[in-house]
Amino acid sequence: MKQYIVKIKSIEPATHDVLKIITEKPLHYNFTPGQATEVSINKLNWKEKKNPFTFTCFPNNDFLEFYIKIYPSHKGVTNELLKLNKEDELIIYEAFGAITYKGNGLFIAGGAGVTPFISILRYLQSKNKIGDNKLIFANKTQKDIILFDEFKKILGKNFINILSDEKVEGYAYGQINEDFLKAYINSSIKNVYVCGPPPMMNDILKQLSKLGVDKNVITVEKM
Ligand SMILES: Cc1cc2nc3c(=O)[nH]c(=O)nc-3n(C[C@H](O)[C@H](O)[C@H](O)COP(=O)(O)OP(=O)(O)OC[C@H]3O[C@@H](n4cnc5c(N)ncnc54)[C@H](O)[C@@H]3O)c2cc1C
């Protein structure tokens, strides 16, 4: 598999447990909004440990951008990213991924599962084609929400937050369930995009099925 070594241009916190990493972009490297790549760290003992992360920039930017949730307790790749600085190197591979934009619809994300939707929604906004797309974004608490201000600006009232572990005025509270989803689903819905941790995805797919959403209109990516 082809690999590309890219230098980190900047690495900074985006939330209390998410890093925003910008790297060089290899010449002629290509992806579509919503796609990901395997990433490893170009350091002894870490080169072989590849984890998938999603591009959040535009395909025509001259850099690559990632938002990466860090799990210190795993002692894995994401924890190791915490030790990196500008000029350190990552290794990336070809782009892949199931989530590409197929038309107006409902995006449902849990935590870092929002990353494929960042570049899709940014791209649509840049083309003035944000339309009636809606994003339901599920997080534990308010401080976990990635890019709140930007999503609010892009989507306005179509940016819907739900928090499972914290009651905050103006936010829905609890887990996404059938009752909650009902308000955003109708029989003519053309596309539903779902991305999040496997248990959440399984629940949401069951709920969508109960609400009569045809599985052919659902695009999923498990994280
Ligand atoms: C297509 C795709 C795109 C993705 N894009 C993004 C993205 O843009 N941003 C993002 O933040 N995430 C993304 N993810 C998820 C991301 O790949 C994982 O969260 C990340 O690889 C976890 O790495 P880690 O360093 O925590 O653990 P790893 O290096 O995967 O594992 C290290 C060790 O931690 C332990 N471990 C692993 N998982 C758990 C667990 N759940 N509980 C307890 N112990 C565990 C295991 O012992 C494991 O050996 C994506 C996933 C997919 C499939």
Image: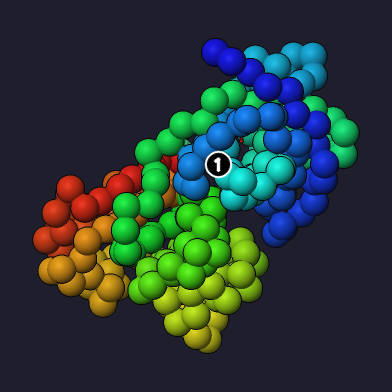
Instruction: Give the image location of residue 55, x and y in percent.
Output: 58, 43
Quadrant location, ligand no. 1: top right
Q: How crowded is mark 1: few (under 14 residues within 10 Å), some or many (20 or more)?
A: many
Find disc 1 in the rendering and name its residue: 54
Q: Does the residue labelled 1 lie within 8 Å of ligand 1?
A: yes
| Percent position of residue 47, x then y | 70, 17
Q: Position of residue 192 (x, y in %)?
A: 29, 57
The residue nearer to you, when weighing 108 against 9, is 9
SS assignment at label 1: strand
Q: Residue at x 52, y 86 (%)?
A: 169
Asked where in the image residue 23 lies, by quadrant, the reply is top right
Please say if 207 is above or below 63. Answer: below
Left/right of residue 24 with respect to residue 113 in the rendered view: right
When asked about the image quadrant of residue 173, the answer is bottom left
Residue most extreme to the bottom: 169
User: Is residue 75 at all visible to an observer of this figure?
Assistant: no
> Residue 42 is drawn in which quadrant?
top right
Considering the image in quadrants, where does the N terminus appear?
Answer: top right
Q: Is residue 169 visible?
A: yes
